Amino acid sequence: MFFSDKERVCLELAERITLIAQNEISDDLYHMVSKYFSDKEYIEIVMMINTVNLWNRIAITFGKK
């Protein structure tokens, strides 16, 4: 096993947020996240994921891949 359950939940959340047009953040996923993280930590994780996605979109827009 390469990732702990806690890490897998974060990766699943990152995937769902990154591909938000094709996915949803279900109540089940939120409850899985809340088993490992406080509300404050959840907000911080969501902001980190969105920040990285923003950087990637800016880089792609300017031809950086």
Image (tube, grey):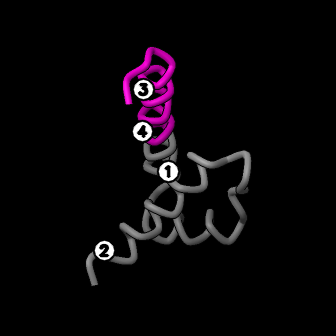
Q: Nearer the viewer, residue 14 or 61?
A: 61
Task: Find the residue positioned furthest to the top.
Answer: 62
Which of the two marks, 1 or 2, is nearer to us in this view?
2
Q: Amino acid at mark 1?
A: Tyr
Mark 2 or 3, which is nearer the eye? 3
Mark 2 crowd level (few <14, some 14–19, many ≥20, 10 Å Cα): few
Q: Are marks 2 and 4 in contact (CB under 8 Å)?
A: no
Q: Which residues are magenta?
A: 47-65
- Please name the residue shown 32% across and 76% down the image: 4
**Which numbered disc, 1 or 2, marks the residue that appears first in the sequence?**
2
Q: CA distance from mark 2 to mark 3?
A: 25 Å
Mark 2 vs mark 4: in front: 2
Which residue is under mark 2?
A: 3
Q: Secondary structure at mark 1?
A: helix
Q: Is residue 46 above or below residue 25?
A: above
Q: Are marks 4 and 1 in contact (CB under 8 Å)?
A: no
Amino acid beneath label 4: Met
33 in relation to 58, above or below: below
N-terminal of the pair, mark 4 or mark 3, is: 4
Q: Which tag, 1 or 3, sits closer to the chain's start? A: 1
Q: Secondary structure at mark 3?
A: helix
Of discs 1 and 3, which sits in the foreground?
3
C-alpha gap between disc 1 and disc 2: 19 Å
- Looking at the rendered structure, the kind of residue marked 2 is Phe
The residue under label 3 is 55
Q: CA distance from mark 4 to mark 1?
A: 10 Å
